[in-house]
Amino acid sequence: MDAIAEMILRLGSWLGGGPALGILTLTFTVRAALIPLLGPLAIRTLGRQRVVKRLRPQIKELHRELRDHPGTLSRELKALHRAHGINVVDWPGLAGALVQLPILIALFQAVLHVWEPEALTIGGTGLGLVSAGLSFFGTKVSGQSEGAPWMLWMSGGLPVAICLWLGTGIGLYLTGFYGAGAVQALLMPKVPTVEAPAPSD
């Protein structure tokens, strides 16, 4: 953490903008460097979400029919998911989250070390709104909120709440993070929506 904090200070000084520019630049750069890994995973996750959405009526019916037979229900759900090319648990998606998590947590802690948390600041509020806009945009453009509008509104509300609580330093971190996320969303190819096949007689 100390090494990352030192990197933030040195980068900010080198760019002539102090720690604020160091936080913003390093966070954006680190998150952008993860795009080659996270971009394909995001596309894959979106495709999986669409399949699960199509399967929802069948999944609900299985739960209704087999609610008293959990073992059979588990096997049937696995078979249904496998027949449509997905797993019940999105293991690659979880792996992608686990890869980025330690890096982003270490950077988050370094930012708290460089910039003392301070609630309800003007800078934190403004940056909260900026990061919320970037988060909302990235979530909308990437299609991650398809069929889950609550996710879209949470993507806008959560950054504001965090920045109101922790202040300007974390606001800079989130602005860099969601800024790179918005770039990733723009770079993602459009995943076509595949309509569910008509039921056979």
Image (cartoon, grey):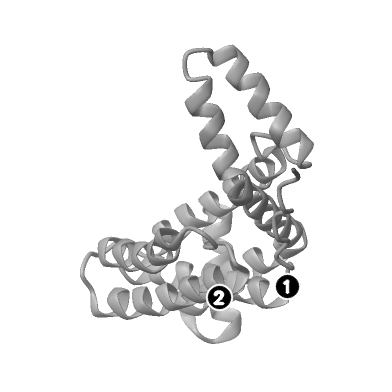
Which residue is farthest front? Answer: 201
Which residue was labeled with disc 2?
179
Determine if residue 100 is in view: yes
- Which of the 4 quarters of the picture holds residue 34? bottom right
Which residue was labeled with disc 1?
190
Q: Residue at x 72, y 75 (%)?
A: 187
Q: Amino acid at mark 2?
A: Gly
Which residue is farthest bottom? Answer: 16
Please report whichever mark, 1 or 2, sits nearer to the chain's N-terminal start.
2
Q: Nearer the viewer, mark 1 or mark 2?
A: 1
- Which of the 4 quarters of the picture holds residue 84? top right
Determine if residue 9 is in view: no
Secondary structure under tag 2 reads helix
Nearer to us in this view, 157 or 78: 78
Q: Are marks 1 and 2 in contact (CB under 8 Å)?
A: no
Q: Position of residue 183 (x, y in %)?
A: 64, 76
Nearer to us in this view, 190 or 54: 54
Q: Position of residue 31 (x, y in %)?
A: 63, 64
